[in-house]
Image (cartoon, coloured by chain):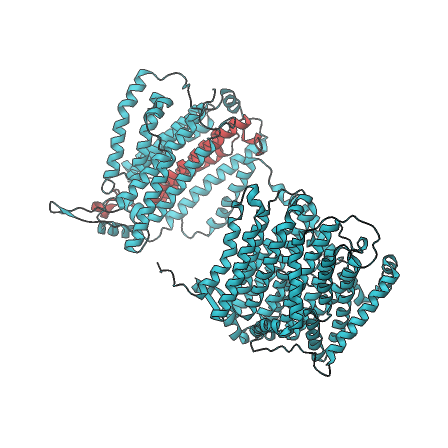
Chain colours: A cyan, B red
Amino acid sequence: MERFPPPSAGWALALLIALPFAAAAAGPLLRGARLRRVAWWPAAAVAALCLSGFVWLRASHGEVRFVLPWIPAWNLDLRLRLDGLAFLFAVLVTGIGVAIAVYSARYLDEELRNHRSTRSPATFHALLLFFLGSMLGLICADELFTLYAFWEATSVSSFLLIGLHLHERRARAAAIEAFAITAGAGLLLFLAFICIAAEAGASALPTLAERKVALATSPLAPWIGLFLVVGAAAKSAQAPLHFWLPSAMVAPTPVSAFLHSATMVAGGVFLLARLGPLHDALPGFRTLVVALGAITMLAGGIGATGAHRLKAILAWSTIAQYGFVTLLLGLGAWGAATFAMAGHAVLKAGLFLVAGVVTRATGETDVRRLGALARAMPVTAGVTFVLALGLAGLPPSVGFWMKELTYGATIDTGVPWIATASFVAGTLTLVYMLRFCWRVFVRRATTRRPLRARRAWLLGPPLVLALLSLAWGIAPGLLASLTDPAAASAAGRPIETEATVGWPPHGAFWLGLASLAVGAAIFAWMERRGDAQVAAGAARFGAARAALPPAVLFVALVRAGGPGRTFRRSLPALDAFGRFLARVQTGRLVHYLLFLAAVPIASALWLLPRVERWPELLAIDRVSRSGLALGTLAAAAVGLALAAAIVRSHIASILMVGVVGFVLALIFALLRAPDVALVQVAVETVGALLLLLVLSRIRMTIREAAMSPQGSRPRAGRIATLLAAGAAGAMVAATSLAVQANLGDPALGRAFFERSAAIHVDAVVTAVLVDFRGLDTFVEIVVFAAAALGTALLLARGASGRAPGRQATRDGRPAGGVLRTTTRLVFPVVLIFAGEHIINAATAPGEGFSGGLLTALSIVLLYVGMGYAPVERALPAFGRWGMVAGIGLVLATGLAGRVFRGSFLAHLGPTPTIGGEEIHLTTHALFDLGIFLVVSSGVLAIFRAVGQREELP
Amino acid sequence: MTWLLALTAGALFGVGTWLLLQRDAIRLVLGLSLLLGATNLFLFSCSVFRGAAAPYVPVAGQATDPVPQALVLTAIVIGFGVVAFLSALVLTVAWRMKTLDADAVSRLRD
């Protein structure tokens, strides 16, 4: 076993990512009303701890890598890397996470109350931490499949958080929609990753960057590019997979602020940035991304202008802003793209938080019904204006520089339509942001709503974010120092962003100024005309434009028609298909068993004709004595089985099957398998006794009802049963013949004799069980213990669901004196035999299994002869604990073998010489003892469970 | 010997399957028990070599194959565990649903 590697920066990184997961797992432990109230600060503390951890790591170690070997044969390792890009996002995610945790401290209680939800804040924060951990893992992943694992983890946590209010249909539907889109596209992403790994021969990102050529020349390259874009687009809500984001706004505001504005939806563009070195290797990739970005930013802008609810405006705005980022990534403007990602995260998170404040204060979410709040909520108004106008691109906010860089990049391409599209989108940004802040705070209200007291606490986080955006706006170099290393990681070369206006101001500045002016004009016109007229005008305009095919695409995209409606309409069809498939589940056991039987029979029908050799036909010219004995026994077994099948009485059937078992034991003995015969005898005795005991615990009326003629099954059913039984029997017989004619190499069996002799064990079967195939035996006793435990637990509740403890006080007619005395005499003899089996396990028939079974059998005999209660009083109860002790003993021997001999379950022990002979004392005996404990305790646990319940016959 | 083992195993398996498909739950358990026995016999028939002696080192020359014997041993014990669990299920069903009819029991509710 390798020793743990010394602590290093790589392990520190891994620990930082594991920390939120561990904290999330501890979440449900916070029960109790008093603890509920402070549930938020562990979340904030963890996020803050991660933030400081990342900063410290970056400052002290620069770039940190972590590699955990996983599947060496496929070159698959778990890799983490903290480079510029990962650091930027780590700071954003953890920083905003702290803000969100603080915000939800006061926000969540009332939210849960308003929705009459039964979830606890502790669950919410645990989910939030789970998401935080997944996101951190996603951004630090340095290898394709590690990235994918965390990608899906973020999808799952998003699903859980959107559907927080489980009992609300809207929440569930939105969660399913979000998950279906992001995870469905995630599957395509997985496919792309597999193709990349297969073509390039590696899945670690640094290696991939070197093997670009192999990727570029592969025939799969266009598909890889397409799937990558689809996966990233779904995650970042780019058209046409954007419609899940507005629906996801049913989530609580902190969730929307954290996941669906700043972090999770950034995952898609993050992926595009992370795979930056591969962009030129995939044909058509850049064009696709640019087109995607352009369409999305326009569609998002139009959608946001037409949206009415606060959070819906912000959702569409997020779609549009990430359209900008996607466009920049496609153009290769790395510096501008990372700058925009960071700025947008901070601004959008802040905007969502103030939207939550406004909604909490007024109880209203629709922009058309809000107004004139600036006097009552001045600080909120100030913060909102700073954030909203900042996003629109007004100085001195960071948004101004975002827009500058964006326009600069689009102008630099030299393609006019790209610059035009970004101009239009930028104009729309101002329009809808003005709508957001002007409408809510300045404009005269159309309805008067009473203002509820709001908490200053809630304003804290958005205030901090607004101040941060201002700070970055005044000194953009601060943000550039974070984003430039990020851009450098994505581009593969150093990047320096110059956030300056220049003198004379370059084209981007004039473009920005023009877009602001046009946007303000459009907004003023919309305000003057009023809502209804604007809507009517848009409808007429839309109808006119519908005649133009390209415009139809836009209308379809924007109004959440098109892809959204198609998706929602397909859900009932999916349900119907599922119900159709579920018709296979008839609810009747016999049908399921017939289906189960059909599969091996069908496969046998397919396989058996392909067998090469068959044994010769039965030729009875010489009948040996053993052959005669075997034939008689076989006939007896089959005859008894048929009789058991036909006979009506339950007791008779049970006894006959028991005798069949004994006959089988005799057959095993004749086939030269004494150990197996012993075990079979013991098991059959115990089994018959168990079944009789079970029978006695069932009411006579029920039993008689079951014993009555079975003619009520339709004839088709009976014929089907007979056919299935006949086919199954024929299949087994034919398979056995086929196997016997095509036997394998005897070397395996013969080798065991040599190995057995080497370890001085005469009984080869015992040696195989305990020494050579110890792991199989270990698993097998665990399975047996599980079955015994399951039986005990299943019967612990009993008939009326009462807790156990009601012992059987009435044992029916007391057993006669002869039976009592006989069992008391026989029981110690059986115990002696059991002991002999264990002591002579290595040289004579019998080992831990038969010893354990005989011990249990002896005690069961006591139950039969003396009744349940006296035995329970006299003998110590060692049901469950015996099994645990047995398994523990075997585990201990195994681990001792691992530590001292190098492999699990290797036997070790001293071999002293006593009286001139070598005595071999190995842990073989301890293993056997463990088996003995498990088997005997298991059987006794079963009997105790069945016997303890009193049921009136 | 070849045919004997194969046919016996097949016959027992067939009877066991027939019992398994019956309505009476007790017969179901018995059918499973027979099925397990038949499978063990089938495993025995797969012995690669058969001899006149049991597998012990002193008689290694004429011994039989120890591998199927080891497999069958564990299979018997686990089979008992399974039968015990199944009989516990039957008992629970008999108590809760007041019937031993497998056709009548199709819902998990009490």
Residue A167 image point, x, y percent: 66, 43
Q: Quadrant of the N terminus of chain A?
A: bottom left
Q: Classify A183 as above or below A858.
A: below
Measuring 80% from the left and 64% from the top, which residue is drawn there?
A552
Q: Where is residue A851, by image quadrant?
A: top left
Residue A444 image point, x, y percent: 84, 56
Q: Classify A635 as above or below A6.
A: above
User: Residue A769 versus residue A671: which sits nearer the camera?
Assistant: A769
Q: Classify B38 as above or below A184.
A: above
Measuring 27% from the left and 53% from the top, which residue is drawn there?
A751
Residue A382 image point, x, y percent: 73, 61
Q: Name the residue at the left extreme.
A: A916
- Indicate left or right for A158 with A648 as reference: right
Q: Name the residue at the bottom extreme.
A: A504
Measuring 27% from the left and 25% from the top, which residue is drawn there?
A826
- Indicate left or right for A64 with A877 as reference: right
Q: Where is residue B99, by image quadrant?
A: top right
Would residue A738 be seen by someone viewing this image from the given angle?
yes
Residue A892 image point, x, y percent: 32, 47
